[in-house]
């Protein structure tokens, strides 16, 4: 009995002595640090072209590497404006687009008419200025008087249109942009009337230097109007902002969906306790359940807002995979393991106990 008691004591003493040694040794043994989680799959970029009854054509480029829309464009239509669009001409039988490809070109009756009128008025104004400056004015007096009368008629019509637009705007039936455009048109008409009135007066009494400057300012205003109309025309042309494949959409509001598959973004929840193991720009190994290949991924962003999932405090991390399997499709939710580096065996055991 005494012998067995001593043997048991030796075992206890040996065990107590070994534990500190093992703990000390475990501080020098490294093991891979793995985080088991799951991810939602997103493409690198997506461009969506939609038709909105209020806004017109809406272009929205979503960059999932940044986590937000990186480009947003709206082309508004005026009430009563006739729009024709060449759409099928550019996308017929196309499965993918290159960056900068023309996708949609629209023609506006209002813009085309106003641009033609502005070009004609500019040419007339330049000719008037030239004739006034060279004192060749005799055949122009009657024409200038008719121009003044015509512009006054247009101004009265535009005032009535502006008044109706203002009432519709106050009642919420018209946009502010439409109201401002009508007011701007009235201002241009009044400027043009002043130009023609000044021309008529100059033809009768002679042209002073300051009056010539006034005519030049009218020409400048006409050029600004043409610049505005040309910018409006450019807004009616839609170019693909990304290279990608065309994704079928059965929504009546969605005209086109182009997705960039050059990379895949994984939206992944990470436990708060694992936060200190990751940082932006870090390269990690990603193993996906059901996929044989181990991928290299880069941490793009770390959300600083804490969420609760299954009673666990987590933050969301965005990971970029440049090379991925064609079976990894946007919209999927996949289980995965993230190897973020190495840790000591002691820290690994402590982490398992705490979790």
Image (cartoon, helix red, strand yellow):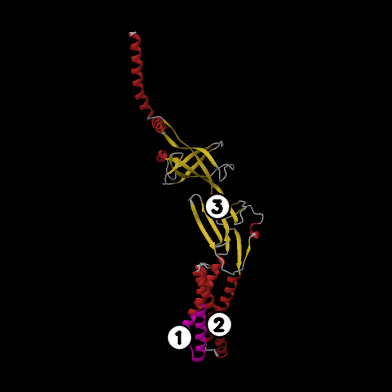
Residue in the image at 58% along x and 78% along y: 120
Quadrant showing the C terminus: top left
Image spot of residue 232 (x, y percent): 55, 67
Q: Earlier in the sequence, mark 2 or mark 3?
A: 3
Within-10-Å neighbours for mark 1: few <14, some 14–19, many 20+: few
308 with respect to 232 (left or right)? left
Element assignment for label 1: helix
Q: Which residue is mark 3?
A: 46
Distance between mark 1 and mark 2 Cα atoms: 29 Å
Q: Which residues are magenta?
A: 188-216
Spot the residue most to the front.
171
Position of the N terminus, as image quadrant, is top left
Residue highlighted by disc 2: 153
Q: Main secondary structure of the magenta part?
A: helix
Evaluate if marks 1 and 2 touch, with contact meaning CB atoms under 8 Å apart.
no
Please tell me which residue is depicted at 37% across the width and 25% down the height of the picture: 22
* Residue 296 drawn at (x, y percent): 50, 41
The residue shown at (54%, 73%) is: 226
Classify mark 3: helix, strand or loop. strand
Q: Which residue matches tag 1?
A: 209
Is 304 rendered above or below residue 137?
above
Q: Height in image: 249 above or below 14?
A: below
Q: Quadrant of residue 110?
A: bottom right
Residue 3 among those drawn in magenta: no
Question: In the image, is residue 204 part of the stretch drawn in magenta?
Answer: yes
The residue carrying pointer 2 sits among few (fewer than 14), some (14 to 19) or many (20 or more) residues within 10 Å by Cα, namely few
Q: x, y percentage for residue 271?
A: 43, 39
The answer to which image quadrant residue 161 occupies is: bottom right
Q: Is residue 82 above or below residue 333?
A: below
Q: Residue at x 64, y 59 (%)?
A: 90
Please state which of residues 196 and 342 is positioned toward the viewer in this rendering: 196
């Amino acid at each position: 009995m005494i012998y067995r008691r001593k043997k048991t004591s030796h075992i206890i003493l040996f065990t107590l002595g070994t534990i500190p040694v093992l703990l000390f040794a475990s501080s020098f043994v490294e093991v891979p640090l793995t985080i088991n989680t799951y991810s939602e799959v997103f493409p690198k970029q997506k461009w969506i072209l939609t038709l909105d009854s209020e806004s017109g054509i809406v272009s929205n480029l979503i960059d999932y590497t940044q986590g937000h829309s990186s480009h947003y464009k709206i082309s508004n239509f005026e009430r009563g404006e006739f729009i024709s669009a060449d759409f099928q001409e550019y996308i017929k039988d196309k499965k993918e687009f290159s960056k900068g490809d023309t996708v949609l070109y629209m023609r506006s009756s209002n813009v085309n008419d106003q641009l033609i009128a502005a070009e004609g008025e500019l040419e007339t104004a330049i000719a008037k200025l030239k004739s006034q400056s060279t004192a060749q004015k005799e055949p122009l007096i009657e024409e200038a008087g008719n121009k003044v009368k015509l512009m006054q008629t247009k101004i009265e019509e535009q005032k009535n249109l502006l008044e109706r637009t203002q009432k519709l705007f106050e009642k919420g039936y018209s946009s502010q942009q439409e109201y401002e455009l009508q007011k701007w048109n009235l201002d241009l008409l009044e400027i043009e009337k002043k130009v023609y009135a000044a021309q008529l007066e100059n033809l009768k009494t002679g042209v002073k230097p300051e009056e010539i400057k006034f005519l030049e300012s009218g020409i400048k205003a006409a050029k600004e109007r043409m610049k505005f109309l040309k910018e409006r025309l450019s807004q009616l042309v839609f170019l693909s902002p990304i290279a990608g494949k065309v994704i079928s959409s059965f929504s009546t509001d969605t005209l086109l969906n182009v997705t960039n598959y050059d990379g895949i973004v994984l939206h992944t929840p990470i436990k708060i306790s694992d936060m200190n193991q990751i940082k932006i720009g870090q390269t990690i190994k990603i193993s996906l359940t059901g996929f044989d290949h181990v991928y290299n991924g880069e941490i793009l962003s770390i959300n600083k807002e804490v969420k609760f999932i299954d009673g666990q405090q987590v933050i969301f991390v965005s990971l970029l995979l440049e090379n991925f399997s064609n079976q990894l499709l946007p919209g999927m939710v996949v289980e995965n393991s993230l190897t973020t580096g190495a840790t000591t065996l002691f820290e690994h055991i402590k982490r398992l106990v705490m979790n």
